[in-house]
């Protein structure tokens, strides 16, 4: 998978690049509008991450240019602006998602994977992890071919865990992924624990090994070891 | 009261006073002239009468008896000459009329005579009538002409003013427009229009600056926060960290997260206060928003075993849809956060009223402080303390009223419009 990151803040760009490189993605980075346009004109990407505010131009123009050059590329806008107008304009221009800074890298990762999955028309939209098999279009989850009925939140949680496999996930990032702006309603994170417990039980009941490891004081890690 | 009507009032009062004073002056001066003329004539007659009396012996007596206007009476002693006014019966018209009389004494043939010359002052009587009539006519004419002038003025001369007023009335700062006007002939209106144009230019640029500042502040703070969070997340993946280091890192991450949310909530609050959300034009039906939100919060409601009871009429208030979402969201989350285990929430939506009732612990703070920013019941809660402040601001900006009541264990928040 090939990503292009258009972001003027070097420190943030490096973190994002490192994160995706660990996922075995090729992540190229440009810091300004000019070089972004150059890259878009020469190469093809699976997904482009655009910061709207660039030192020498408007990121939305880059989105327009990209839509013209290669309409099949997924686009995620990352912006410090949470203004409704920009959000609506960005989505109207054909970007797939809009993420407001600050965000969790694990959240960005999950969204990038979702965009790429939606955009791959080769039919290979299945998600596989160990014994788990998911067909996202039908919200179908199976372990060793046996279907598991999950609630909406449990399903979202599973997708998020698999997208960020082999990584430590903080409780806040999980809470924010599942409840969005309502995450601060959780006075403690017992709540996530309930969902994790239920999900783990449903998976293990069907003979799935326990992939989920709890990291004391931080959160969880989903991995095959 | 209309400005023109007020001006008209003063104009009328002033012109009445001036007219009546003028009429009085006119009357006095004309009367003085008439009196002077009458006196002159009387003195001329006196000269004639004197001459005639000097030649009394050669003249027939009847000449001297001229009825009312000239009377000669023999008297024993002479008196002072007297010029006076009196009222006498005019036989010709059979009514009392004013006369001017000159009485003097003259000696003829050794006998003193008192001679009275009278002059009818008919002109003067006519004068009063004429003056009153003329003044009445002028007043009536003035009134009519002023009314006509005013209505003409208000439709013609004041037209640019009403045009400016209409434009100002329809002015909406969110549209970033400056009001431009055509040149007017009337200097004052032209100045007014220029002043309005300059004012709107300044206001628009100030508004633009403020908006840009808020947006920039968001950008400038959010970006470093994003850097902090991403670096922390990177660190979490480091397998060599000890447990205590991870715990410390985790609290740093929590604080940074909180800062981010706080910044966003404050920005939102500022935006609403700056009225950067356009005013709603159509009523927004709150029912789907409420139901959607309840679905989102389902887990929480079930976990805390809260019973929800709804009574919703499909109506809503005129508001920006995004603000409606925030309003409903904050009221419902507030009702859940401050609820007790096995508690209850009753949501009612009726014409003009949206009411959220929830069971909860007794309030430690003054109900009036409830809507203040950063007012929280417990410092440990994850709440930012901005939820109700946001609801309050939304209501203020939109012209709704937010009230809080407490009824035993029930806390009742009502939005009325």
Image (cartoon, grey):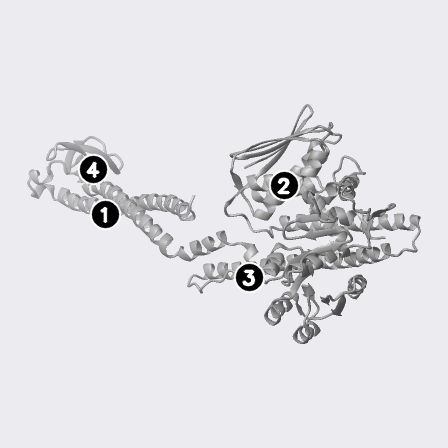
Label 1 with label 2: CB-CB less than 8 Å: no
Query: Can you tell which mark lies on residue B293?
Result: 2
In what element is the residue under mark 3?
Answer: helix
Label 4 with label 3: CB-CB less than 8 Å: no
Q: Label 1 crowding class (10 Å Cα cut-off): few <14, some 14-19, many 20+?
A: few
Question: What is the distance, in whole Å, between disc 1 and disc 3 at their CAs?
Answer: 69 Å
Quarter of the picture containing the N terminus of chain A is bottom right
Residue at the far top in the pictured view: B408
In what element is the residue under mark 4?
Answer: strand
Q: Residue at x 27, y 43 (%)?
A: B136
Specify which label sits upstream in the sequence, 2 or 3: 3
Marks 4, 3 in one chain: yes
Single out the mark in the foreground, 1 or 2. Answer: 2
Query: Can you tell which mark lies on residue B198?
Result: 3
Return the residue nearer the eye: A14 or A125.
Answer: A125
Return the residue nearer the eye: B40 or B368.
Answer: B368
In what element is the residue under mark 2?
Answer: helix
Query: Can you tell which mark lies on residue B99?
Result: 4
Of all chains, the one bearing label 3 is B
Residue B158 position in % (x across, y down) = 40, 55
Q: Which residue is mark 1?
A: B37
In-image side of B399 versus B359 (left or right): left
Label 4 with label 2: CB-CB less than 8 Å: no
Label 2 with label 3: CB-CB less than 8 Å: no
Single out the mark in the foreground, 4 or 2. Answer: 2
Q: Is residue A104 visible?
A: no
């Amino acid at each position: 998978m090939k990503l292009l990151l258009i972001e003027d803040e070097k420190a943030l760009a490096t973190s994002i690049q490192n994160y995706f490189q660990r996922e075995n993605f090729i992540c190229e980075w440009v810091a300004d509008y000019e070089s972004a346009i150059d890259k878009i004109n020469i190469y093809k990407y699976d997904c482009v991450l655009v910061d709207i505010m660039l030192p020498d131009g408007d990121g939305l123009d880059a989105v327009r240019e990209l839509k013209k050059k290669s309409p099949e590329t997924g686009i995620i806008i990352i912006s410090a602006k949470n203004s409704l107008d920009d959000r609506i304009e960005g989505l109207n221009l054909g970007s797939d998602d809009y993420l407001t800074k600050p965000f969790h890298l694990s959240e960005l990762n999950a969204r990038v994977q979702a965009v790429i999955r939606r955009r791959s028309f080769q039919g290979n939209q299945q998600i596989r992890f160990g014994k788990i098999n998911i067909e996202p279009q039908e919200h179908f989850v199976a372990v060793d071919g046996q279907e598991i009925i999950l609630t909406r939140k449990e399903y979202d949680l599973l997708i998020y865990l698999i997208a960020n496999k082999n990584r430590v996930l903080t409780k806040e990032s999980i809470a924010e992924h599942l409840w969005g702006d309502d995450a601060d309603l959780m006075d403690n994170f017992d709540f996530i624990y309930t969902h994790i417990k239920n999900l783990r039980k449903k998976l293990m009941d069907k003979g799935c090994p326990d992939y989920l490891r709890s990291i004391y004081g931080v959160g969880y890690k989903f991995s095959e070891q | 009261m209309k400005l023109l009507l007020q001006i008209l009032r003063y104009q009328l009062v002033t012109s009445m006073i001036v007219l009546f004073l003028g009429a009085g002056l006119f009357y006095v001066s004309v009367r003085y002239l008439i009196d002077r003329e009458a006196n002159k004539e009387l003195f001329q007659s006196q000269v004639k009468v004197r001459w005639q009396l000097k030649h009394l012996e050669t003249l027939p007596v009847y000449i001297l008896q001229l009825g009312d206007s000239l009377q000669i009476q023999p008297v024993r002693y002479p008196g002072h000459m007297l010029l006076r006014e009196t009222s006498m019966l005019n036989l010709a018209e059979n009514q009392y009329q004013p006369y001017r009389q000159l009485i003097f004494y003259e000696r003829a043939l050794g006998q003193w005579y008192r001679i009275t010359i009278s002059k009818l002052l008919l002109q003067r009587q006519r004068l009063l009538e004429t003056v009153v009539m003329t003044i009445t006519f002028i007043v009536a004419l003035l009134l009519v002409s002023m009314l006509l002038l005013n209505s003409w003025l208000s439709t013609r001369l004041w037209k640019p003013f009403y045009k400016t007023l209409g434009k100002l009335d329809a002015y909406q700062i969110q549209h970033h427009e400056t009001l431009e006007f055509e040149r007017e002939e009337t200097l004052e209106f032209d100045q007014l229009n220029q002043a309005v144009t300059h004012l709107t230019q300044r206001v628009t640029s100030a508004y633009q600056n403020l908006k840009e500042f808020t947006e920039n502040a968001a950008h400038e703070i959010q970006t470093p926060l994003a850097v902090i969070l991403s670096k922390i997340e990177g660190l979490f993946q480091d397998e060599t960290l000890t447990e205590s280091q991870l715990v410390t890192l985790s609290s740093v991450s929590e604080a940074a997260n909180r800062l981010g949310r706080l910044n966003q909530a404050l920005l939102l609050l500022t935006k609403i206060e700056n009225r950067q959300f356009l005013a709603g034009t159509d009523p927004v039906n709150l029912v789907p928003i409420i139901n959607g939100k309840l679905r989102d919060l389902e887990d929480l409601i079930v976990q805390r075993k809260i019973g929800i009871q709804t009574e919703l009429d499909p109506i809503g208030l005129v508001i920006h849809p995004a603000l409606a979402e925030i309003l409903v969201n904050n009221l419902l989350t507030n009702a859940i956060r401050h609820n007790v285990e096995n508690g209850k929430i009753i949501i009612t939506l009726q014409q003009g009223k949206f009411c959220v009732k929830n069971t909860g612990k007794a309030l430690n703070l003054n109900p009036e402080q409830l809507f203040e920013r950063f007012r929280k019941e417990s410092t440990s809660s994850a709440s930012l303390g901005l939820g109700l402040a946001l609801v309050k601001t939304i209501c203020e900006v939109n012209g709704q009223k937010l009230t809080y009541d407490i009824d035993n264990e029930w806390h009742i928040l009502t939005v009325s419009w």
